[in-house]
Amino acid sequence: MGKKLLLASDHAGFPMKQHIYHWLKKHGYEVTDLGTDGEESVDYPDFGHKLGSMIDENDEYIGIGLCGSGNGMNMSVSQHSSTRSALCWNTEIASLARRHNDANVCVLPGRFVTQNQAEEIVEKFLNTGFEGGRHDNRVKKIPLK
């Protein structure tokens, strides 16, 4: 998936975001960090909307979002018309999100996965393609806007 990567998190996802950022850079990915920049309490929608807006502006981006449970970030990112955001807590979900839903945002529950699990989930997400076929029409029906 040779696209540009965007990372965004709230304070609860910040430690895992930092780990994933460095892991991705080590593996040669081009990564833009949209914040937050620390563990001071912030509002996840601010960063989820920043991530979603960037994808709305440029479909070359793939997003990775993190918050404590993943739910708030996923809900915020999903409000944007060009995003197909998936809350991924294991590699099977990440694979299905890409293969069947053509997901372009992987949201991780930063408090509920280990660093190794997060790496495996992101790797699976980035290296799995969309199957198309019967899923094409379904994916086209997702946006309401």
Image (cartoon, grey):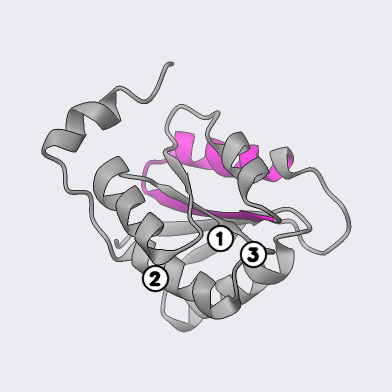
Which of the two discs, 1 and 3, sits closer to the camera? 3
Element at badge 2? Answer: helix
Amino acid bearing label 1:
Thr
| Residue 112 tag number | 3
Look at the numbered disc 1 and give the secondary structure of its residue: strand
Asked whether residue 36 is drawn in magenta, I would say no
List x then y, in percent, for residue 82. 42, 32
Amino acid at the residue labelled 3? Phe
Label 1: which residue? 32
Q: What is the three-letter code of the residue carrying label 2?
A: Glu
Mark before the other along the chain sequence, 1 or 2: 1
**Magenta residues, start to end:** 46-67
Can you see residue 34?
A: no
Name above or below for residue 122 compared with residue 50. Answer: below
Mark 1 or mark 2, whichever is nearer to me: 2
Mark 3 residue crowding within 10 angstroms, few (<14) / some (14–19) / many (20+): some
